[in-house]
Amino acid sequence: MESPAPRALAPGTVALPIDEVLRIANEYERGSRLADAQRLLNHILGGAPHQGDALHLAGVVAFRLGDIDTALDLMVRSLRHGIDTPLYLRNICEVYRALGRLDEALATAQRAIALAPADPLCLHNQAVIHYHRLELQAALDCAGRALRIDPSLPGAHFIRAEALLLRGEWAEGWQEYEWRFRIPGAAPLMPPTAKPQWDGRPLIDGTLLLIADQGFGDVIQFARYIPWVAERCSHVAIAANAEVASLLRQIAPGARQFLRWQDAPDYAAFCPLSGLPRLAGTRIDNVPAPVPYLRADPARVARWADRLERLVPRGFHRIGLIWAGRPTHNNDRNRSALLADFRPLGNVAGIALLALQKGPKTEQAGAWYGRAPMINIGAEIADYDDTMAILDNLDLLVSVDTSVAHLAGAMGHPVWIMLPRAPDWRWLLDRSNTPWYPSARLFRQPNARRWDDVVQAIGEELNASLHQDAIGTRCDRKISAHARHE
Amino acid sequence: MSARIPALCPCGSGLRAVRCCTLQRGSLPPPEAIRHLVPIVERAMQAHRQGADETAERLCLDVLELAPDRPGALSILYEIRKAQGKHQAAEALIRRIVAFDPNNLAATNELALILLGKGSLAEAEHHARNAIRVAPENPRAHNLMGMILTEANRPQVGEYHYRRVLELTDQRDPVLLANLAWNLKNQGRMQEARTLYQESVAAAPKIRQTLLGFARLEEADRNFDGAATILDKVSALFPKDQGVQLTRAVLLGRMRRYDEALAMIDGAAGDNGQLGPNELLEKGRLLDQIGRYDDAWAAFAEGKQLARKLSGQEYLDDSAQQQIERLRGFFIAGRLRLLPRARTRTDMPQPIFILGFPRSGTTLVEQTLSAHPNIAAGDELPLIHEISAILPRMLASPLGYPEALAELWMGDQREGLDNLRDYYLQKVRQMGVLRQSATRFTDKMPLNETHLGLIALLFPEAPLIHVLRHPLDIMVSAFSNQFTHGFFCAYDLETAARHYVRVMDLVQHYRAEMTLRYLPIRYEDIVADQKASVHSMLAFIGEPFDKACLTFHNNRRYARTASYAQVTEPLYDRSVYRYRHYRTELEPLLPILRPVIERLGYAVD
């Protein structure tokens, strides 16, 4: 049979068996030709609206195109039409998780396990749901059962790592954390190499290659270990993105930095920055926090001081705001908020909000109509050096869990960090402070996906702090009384 | 036979189109070829002088068929068409005379006057300026400039030209005095205006326009009894006059004698029983005051429809869309990072921009702020719009606005924004806005938010106060008042809503792409908690609180715009959520407005 050209598949022109069309659609989906896959699936479903496999695959495609509600609808319909395989259930489970419907996600995960009790993927899947429900023991149990079936299942190790680290059991957690690079689809740390990963012992002769891996927040957080590394290795080179180059230069002025792998120097061993806490034997009670370990450039601080002096009315407390992280982060739906969620802060008297937001979510700044003025300073920020200089001119930063929150912490600036119900492991559980950043205060979500309680708590704290003058103001206090509607 | 009927020009001149509005200059015969026509023109003139218009008309048409540029024939035909009330034809003819002979002073003055009558102020000003260039000592030309600039809300410049007329004629013509008085009234110089009106009336006691203007002055200055006395006099002279009765109705409305006011308006209907657009809108507003909402709406709708019909104007949809798309395309963060900003002058008062859709409360905010000792009132300054028009020339750019701002990347235009900033400030000074001791002044030109990007380049530190109001309330108010801002959107409810949404979306775009010193302030908040709103506005501007701002209705400054009667009263809340009386009528607007209503945090109930 000829390989069918998509054009030949217009309705009524060629009669291909559904299975064949479905196979092609599957190939398209795997090759990320999502629009093509969708077109074929619509064609199938036009003639056979109850075709379970087509419904399900259409759901997967819709999910990948970002239309989660449609995805769920299609997948639920596929279930109704007799498709009850563990794979499909796992997919639906992921859709429920993405939608924050964790009860349904858990029920679906359990149904998948009932169908395939020996499938470690189903168990891993359920462990992830438990983690997001903050049922850490259950998550560890499920991951443990999965690992008894398949001891080298990277995902199960990684979810164990996250649960253990979040519980503060770091020694075991760091070990499991090493599985992160083996997860299918994870971005490789570096091009294949025969060189060993550094074991933490002094390296006198050769160069140690550090890799500023993961997000920029991780880089800022783990860069604190570079001086510890420098005590053990006489030559350090760092592979880092341009965005963080100047930050790393502050911490490691002697280290050679490069952007492209072809510029890498010859090296004896390598290590990701995110691997350093393990090598340093970090426990909650010995986290190195030599703040400030990042500082703004005085000339830039002066320039921004002048700019802000002209933009922000005198006497207003300057509160920085970041409501969203990088949208491609795999937990972005949980960690990012909407600017609209911050509406109650608009009623706090005597403050000016400075939006430090960058990236595509900046456009929300245009729709702020709160009583407290908001100045979209993000539009003029070019790099982290600008951000640091601005932070130096603020009274407080309120931010979701994203890189600038780390930056403020590393500078020793007051920062209030808003955490999702199931936070990233580094923020631990139940505490409002963090050993990583003494100047940070944590505000945790009592209910998953709902920022209203968090914003309300922040609003109350802000009012109280302003009242007690606990938050400084960069301006003349005498005038600030005016701004408070007294 | 019918095939031989020549295609007459649609303007109604009686000439063939190819000899009239589609005339090609290249097709004109050389002067020596038409010498033989001179006697015919002379005969036409004679006939016209003797009142034999039919003969004069036939002769002119004959001449112009052969020589379409004969000024004498054009002038006579113009006079005839004007007398016949064929305005389109008359305008086409006078335009042609001016085009063929730009030095023809009489025709230029005449054209400027026609354009002023039509409300085409920018074009009228263009020709009036030409007239003064041609004849710098011609009183009529200066008088026209005075009238046009008074209408165009540049009364200070208008005053200069009126005073030139006084010097040049060395006479105190009563009509001129009345015009100057009206000008001064628009500057809020009530006592000077009153003195001039008194002088004018003493010299010529029976001129309708003078007496009406005088009555309006007294009404605006809250001397209701004085206004009534003058109106009694003018009614006796012109008993059936619509304008007189409308002025009386407005006065009665301000005195809260609504029933009498309504009766007055209904009595003002002409012989055909028809009210004019202004009368209908005033009637609707009075009906609204007494709670007869259905009748009020019907009057608004009829008034708007009639205004549209009489003016021939409607929303310039494509132009509006095009301009907004171009602004949105140009003002983006990546480009703005590369553009310079004007430096802030420290040697003179600086602007506060009060932004908002017409009828959203900008007058109230200006009156409130300008009660402050440090803040002078600038009113609706047409300057930002003007700068957007002259910007390409000032930056020597082959592009239009806003793309011409790309010239700022050229080495010789790096200070271009400073020049534009100075143009604005110099005009402000010339307009007499600046007040001794005030360190700031307001500019409350409605819809200046369309040019938020340009404003922030010229005045990067200026406070931008955007007055928000429930969009449906704005629509009710826009439907019950006449204004031409915003590409004539207010001739119809739906186009007003569409333009409003376009502008609000554009503002959102600017705010997302630019760092602005921007404060939204809600009309409803001012009404509900005036003190808090005044505090936040002044704190945002950077001025200490002053309690004079709370009693802004004692601010003797006269606000020239349609809101003037409202801002001379203490704050009232009957205008808050008044859309609820017109819920059904506004239903068709909901699909257009709902996204903005929600974004602003308002509800519809």
Image: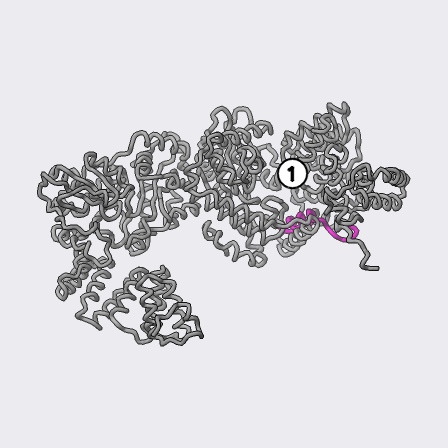
Find residue A411 and report its image quarter: top left
Determine crowd level at label 1: few under 14, some 14-19, many 20+ residues with C-alpha closer than 10 A.
some
Report if residue B538 is visible in the image: no
As for residue A133 lying within the magenta part, the answer is no
* Percent position of residue B591, x then y: 52, 58
Dot 1 lies on which element? helix
Amino acid type of disc 1? Answer: Ala
Find residue A259 and report its image quarter: top left
Output the chain of dot 1: B
Can you say whether A233 is above or below A66 in the image? above
* Percent position of residue B293, x then y: 62, 54
Q: What segment carries the magenta color?
A: B269-290
**Camera-side residue: B176 or B327?**
B327
Can you say whether A448 is above or below B157 in the image? below
Number of marks in the image?
A: 1
> Is B466 on the left-hand or right-hand side of A108?
right
**Camera-side residue: A449 or A18?**
A18
Q: Residue at x 48, y 43 (%)?
A: B330
Find residue B250 and report its image quarter: top right
**Camera-side residue: B444 or B235?**
B444
As for residue B274 lying within the magenta part, the answer is yes
**Camera-side residue: B132 or A115?**
B132
* Percent position of residue A174, x then y: 14, 51
Report if residue B82 is visible in the image: yes
Can you say whether B546 is above or below B330 in the image? above
Query: Which residue is tagged 1?
Result: B122
Q: Residue at x 63, y 31 (%)?
A: B187
Quarter containing the N terminus of chain A? bottom left
Quarter containing the C terminus of chain A? top left
